[in-house]
């Protein structure tokens, strides 16, 4: 059955690829990616992910603004959103302001634990 469907939103192609491989190969997730806020909202509406991993620093529209857009949409209002950010300090993510997000994962993240970290933050067994 797999772990579910994750949408990874980051403007850095390498981050998207590493997160996708980590979630698919280690965690059994089905992964869709987006490189911008507009693309993320469109994909989230049509693909209905179980979780969104959202970069905070994106060009044009940042992560917190995208989070507000997703929360305003009927189809995506209840989807857990986890910030991916280089601004949070590893081991101190709980100090990051969530502003409606489910949790925070600091970049660089560990590809071997990413799936477990996501599952823990959204309350699923890995």
Image (cartoon, helix red, strand yellow):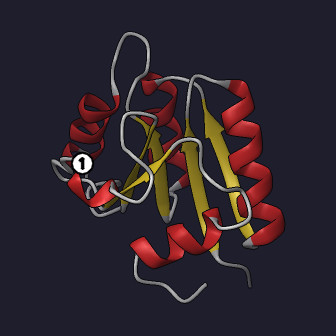
Q: What element carries label 1?
A: loop
Question: Percent position (x, y) of residue 93?
Answer: 33, 55
Q: Residue at coordinates 33% horizontally, 56% vertically from top-left?
A: 92
Is 97 located above or below residue 11 in the figure? below
Q: Is 105 placed above or below 72 here?
A: below
Q: Residue 52 location in percent, x, y?
A: 47, 52
Viewer-side residue, 119 vs 3: 119
**Residue 83 falls left or right of residue 114:** left
Question: Furthest-bottom residue in view?
Answer: 125
Q: Is residue 99 left or right of residue 41?
A: left
Horizontally, residue 60 falls left or right of residue 84, namely: left
Badge 1: how crowded within 10 Å, few (<14), some, or many (20+)? some
Residue under the image location 28 percent in, 64 percent down = 78
- Residue at position x 44%, y 23% from top? 38
Between residue 92 and residue 85, name the one nearer to us: 92
Give the residue at x 40% y 24%. 57
Residue 40: image location, x then y, percent? 48, 34
- Residue 20 position within the rendered picture, expressed as x and y whole percent measured from the top left: 73, 50
- Above or below, 78 against 56 in this view is below
Name the residue beneath numbered marker 1.
96
Q: Which of 70 and 110 is in front in this view?
A: 110
Work out which quarter of the rendered image holds the N terminus and state it. Answer: bottom right
Is 35 rendered above or below residue 107? Answer: above
């Amino acid at each position: 059955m797999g772990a579910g469907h994750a949408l990874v939103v980051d403007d850095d192609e390498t981050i998207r690829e590493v997160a996708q491989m980590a979630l698919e190969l280690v965690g059994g997730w089905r992964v869709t990616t987006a490189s911008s806020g507009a693309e993320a909202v469109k994909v989230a509406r049509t693909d209905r992910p179980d979780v969104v991993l959202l970069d905070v620093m994106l060009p044009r529209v940042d992560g917190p603004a995208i989070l507000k857009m997703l929360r305003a949409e009927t189809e995506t209002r209840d989807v857990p959103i986890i910030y991916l950010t280089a601004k949070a300090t590893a081991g101190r993510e709980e100090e990051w302001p969530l502003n409606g997000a489910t949790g925070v994962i600091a970049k660089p993240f560990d590809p071997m634990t990413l799936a477990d970290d996501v599952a823990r933050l959204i309350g699923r067994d890995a």
